[in-house]
Image (cartoon, grey):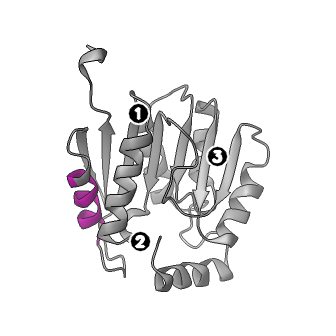
């Protein structure tokens, strides 16, 4: 995860800069990260997970709301940038790799920001299953997807809809914003929860 050609593309982007999408300077990115944090909730999140953390800008803003935060990034240069950015947070771990298996057990928050459309439909299904199998009973997933051209096989809307299809028992609230979708999934309640 993701496909080799997608990995090469992303590695090429990060070879020229550690901020290829201007997360540090873009007003649009700043506003989108603010909305993502709002949808995550104020916390404290006991055991949060961000998959596809890029250079760690969003993770740095999320970290103060978490008791423990694990971020995953498959591009080595991006993971290195995230490690530098998050070095001051002792409770944050940066894992270089993909998300075929969750690197933490029972997360209560999973953030998927602008990463689903880099995956194939089968990989989205695998990721949804891994989250469903491993999440805490009170888990929240916040998934953000760009609605413009992605230059990938999947667009953001398609990727978001696939995740929704593979989490049928989860409650989803969809928020349409200028340029992106933000889906908030809450874990299904069981008879024991009621």
The percent position of residue 192, horizontal first and vertical second, equals 29, 16
Q: In which quarter of the image is residue 135?
A: top left
The answer to whether residue 158 is magenta is yes
| Mark identifier at residue 118 | 2
**Residue segment shown in magenta:** 155-165
The percent position of residue 17, horizontal first and vertical second, equals 67, 76
Does label 3 or label 1 sit earlier along the sequence?
3
Query: Residue at position x 56%, y 61% from top?
Result: 23
The residue to which callout 3 is attached is 60
Q: Is the residue 31 above or below the residue 2 in the image? A: above
The residue to which callout 1 is attached is 139
**Separation of residues labelled 3 and 2 (CA atoms):** 23 Å
- In which quadrant will I find the C terminus? top left
Q: Is the residue 169 above or below the residue 180 in the image? A: above
- Contact (Cβ within 8 Å) of mark 1 with mark 2: no
The percent position of residue 71, horizontal first and vertical second, equals 60, 51
Q: What element carries label 1?
A: loop
Query: Residue at position x 62%, y 45% from top?
Result: 70
Q: Is mark 2 on a helix, strand or loop?
A: helix
Mark 3 Cα-neighbour bin, 10 Å: few <14, some 14–19, many ≥20: some
Q: In which quarter of the image is residue 146?
A: bottom left
Residue 35 in sight from this viewpoint: no
């Amino acid at each position: 995860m993701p496909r080799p050609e997608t990995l090469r593309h992303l590695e090429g982007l990060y070879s020229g800069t550690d901020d290829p999408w201007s997360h540090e300077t873009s007003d649009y990115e700043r506003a989108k990260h603010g909305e993502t944090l709002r949808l995550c909730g104020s916390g404290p999140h006991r055991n949060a997970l961000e998959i596809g953390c890029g250079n760690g800008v969003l993770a740095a803003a999320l970290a103060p709301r978490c008791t423990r935060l694990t971020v995953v990034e498959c591009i080595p240069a991006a993971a290195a940038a995230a490690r530098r950015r998050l070095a001051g947070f002792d409770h944050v771990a940066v894992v270089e790799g993909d998300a075929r298996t969750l690197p933490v057990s029972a997360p209560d928050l999973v953030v998927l920001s602008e990463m689903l459309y880099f995956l194939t439909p089968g990989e989205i299904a695998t990721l949804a299953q891994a989250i469903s199998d491993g999440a805490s009973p009170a888990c929240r997933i916040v998934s953000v997807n760009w609605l413009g051209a992605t230059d990938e096989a999947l667009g953001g809307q398609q990727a978001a809809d696939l995740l929704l299809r593979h989490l049928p028992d989860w409650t989803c609230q969809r928020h349409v914003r200028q340029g992106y979708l933000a889906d908030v999934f809450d874990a299904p309640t069981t008879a024991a929860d009621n």
